[in-house]
Amino acid sequence: MPAKMVPVSCNKDCGAGCPLVAHLESAKIVKITDNPQRPRYMQGCVRGYQAHIAVYDSGRLKRPLIRTGERGEGEFRETGWDEALDYVAKRLQAIKNKYGVTAVMQLGGSGSCRGAVHHTSKLTDRFLTLFGGYTKPTGSYSSGAEQFVTPYLYGTNLAGMDAENLLESRLIVLWGANISDTRFGCETENVIVEARKRGTEVVVLDPRRSRTVERLADLWIPLFPGSDTAMMAAVLCLLIEEGRVNDGFLSRYSKGFEELRDYVLGRFDGTKKDPAWAEPLCGVPQATIRRFARTYGKLKPAALIPGLSIQRTIGGEEAYRMAIALQAATGNVGVAGGSSGSNVWNRLPQPVFQCIGRAPGSENAKIAAVPVYRWADAVLKGRDGGYAEDIKCLYTVGGNPLATGSDVKKNARAFRSVDFSVCHELFMTPTAMYSDVILPATSFLEREDVVFGSGNYLFYSAKAADPPGIAMDDYDIFLKLAEWMGFGGGYSGGLAAAEWLDRFISNSEIADPELFKRSGMYLGPDRRRVAFSDFIANPAANPLSTPSGLIELASKDYAKTGFPAFPTHRGFRPPAGAPLFLITPHARFRVNSQNSNLDWFARRESPVLTMNRLDAAHRGINDGDTVRIYNGNGSLGVPVSLTDGILPGVVCLPAGAWPVFNDKGEITGGCANVLTSTEPTLPSESSRTHSVGVEVEKA
């Protein structure tokens, strides 16, 4: 029997969104491939091609579960929806009556984060605001520092570009951006490959020889984690001294460069930020810094693309501010082939299309806030610890904070401390094991939606499979729970999820909805955009939303945070007892912690520590040994792989592996967040997961 094909698109937090098709035989998905009608550069990845593995895995949750043992022991009994929803509704109402709505904290949110209807964070917010309110973690584990600082310089976070803009570049600098694994656009890697064929030079700065280095780089510059601002300052210093700064561009489009120049040249604090100063901070020979700076100053237009990794450090805010300053100083902002120097993916207006949001009746909801990086501290310390609320309930949808959150031991204590916890899940994750009720949810292949990509396009994702057992979409779970609690009509607005989607499509710029559903994609007319091009063309007519209307390289408003108005180096050095930098990048075969439990993926990417041969020799460690990685937060044991492809002094353990909690309360497995801290980078109060020191010894 010939296979039937239906368009699908990953609704996951990978930074891409891809046009795919599911091949069905006898109503079962047998494979997933790229959509044959996709444009030239678009391509999926192995995580999307194998997404149907999760649909049919024997570990899928098929019925609601209610805890019977102690939290974390994994003992549950199956039940039906009526008992489960009644139980959840009564517990939520009791907490609301006794402590108020803000005693309920939302967690998760990025499990399905690209859909117009099936968006885990927006659906949870829609439900809880009708409930009366909740405590909302603010900021982002992924990009909190970058989102915090970019508006101070540009007045907006819409500082992106379309991937095809890179075809106009003469130089592409991937600064901590591992495009080949983390994706950030279904076109990006292929566009860079094409740009290289046309003569564009690609430089990658990363502590390790990543797949991006192997596949895309003409030059790899390894440097210490968190030293990016120092390296950038040294580059800017040389550009200033050799007259390679675009003074005309700076005077017309920016404000505050004089203060930054005084800092870089040492007039501010007596220390010149030249390549000799940067060499010991970065681990990069000053000759390499000079050679790179001259290349960057000469080849124009240049697109400096900072990865999110460089802002997940102590002082990560400064790395993004300095990257923007470099692009402005070289006249590369807002021009074809250039970039803003800030996060460029998913940061331009997308096709006109509505998304599910708050419902009428939620206007008076009480919303309390806590920085997401401090959520566990807020739970454990409450009002007595200086936080606004005493949290009594954790409601987790689309997240696994007992794997992806920093300091998983603290997170487990937080889950044990609350009165009630509930989650929507596909599998028995570590977070699900610490919940009182688990409500089985669907995957993106088991429902219909419209998915936003990283550029000027939309993808239609059809329902390709039936959910297992009696699992339901998050929309329907919340609808039934809202009906149980008396506000179902407000939640649904009288519409089922499919009816919301049809309404959104009808009200969009899509001229032919039927063609959209058949082809699986809608492409906007302009797909080579770059942010701030209108401002560069006419700054008087199109001023930025900053106080001056210009790019504010020194910001008086930013100085109110207690940090300098201009970017400065605030690096991290590992302490004496934990002298190795630990980096925890995203894994190739996982989306955050998703796929960790699936055998097909786990066999291809089990937790392994990557270590330089010199560091291993000093510690008597051989390739393949099991090693103990430890610091003041915890320890774990994993095999080690020795290589010359990582900077001496740095070790790497990819993030996302699930921790295993044994009956003694100890954690085994390769979860990197056993070693990370919840002390944030300031002033953004964001993630600093690449500012971690560890020691390694033979187990």
Image (spheres, grey):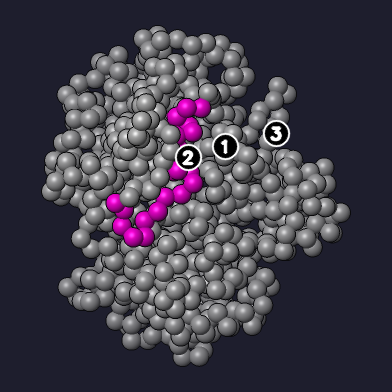
| Circle 1 residues within 10 Å: few <14, some 14–19, many ≥20 | some
Q: Amino acid under label 2?
A: Gln
Indicate which disc, 1 or 2, sits on the residue closer to the N terminus: 2
For label 3, the SS is: strand
Q: Which residues are magenta?
A: 37-57
Residue identifier under label 3? 668
Classify residue 273 as left or right of residue 623.
left
* Viewer-closest of 670 and 121: 670
Amino acid type indicated by mark 3: Thr
Helix, strand, or loop for circle 2? loop
Q: Where's residue 581, x and y in %?
A: 68, 57
In terms of image quadrants, where is residue 645?
bottom right
Is any part of residue 478 visible from this angle?
Answer: no
Q: Is residue 443 left or right of residue 572?
A: left
Q: Residues within 10 Å of mark 2 (few under 14, many from 20)?
A: some
**Left or right: residue 547 compared with residue 583:** left
Residue 39 sits inside the magenta stretch: yes
Say which amino acid is labelled 1: Trp
Vertical relation: 59 (above or below) 647: above
The percent position of residue 580, horizontal first and vertical second, equals 72, 56
Say which residue appears at 62% left-offset and 54% top-offset: 583
Q: Is residue 419 above or below residue 297?
A: above
- Farthest right residue in view: 620
Residue underneath mark 2 = 50
Q: Is the Cβ of the residue at disc 1 closer than 8 Å to that at disc 2?
A: yes
Looking at the rendered image, the quarter that the C terminus falls into is top right
Choose the circle earlier in sequence order: 2 or 3: 2
Of the numbered discs in the image, which one, if any, rests on residue 600?
Answer: 1
* Residue 661 covered by magenta stretch: no
Q: Nearer the viewer, residue 386 or 29?
A: 29
First reached walking from the N terminus: tag 3 or tag 1: 1
Q: Nearer the viewer, mark 3 or mark 1?
A: 1
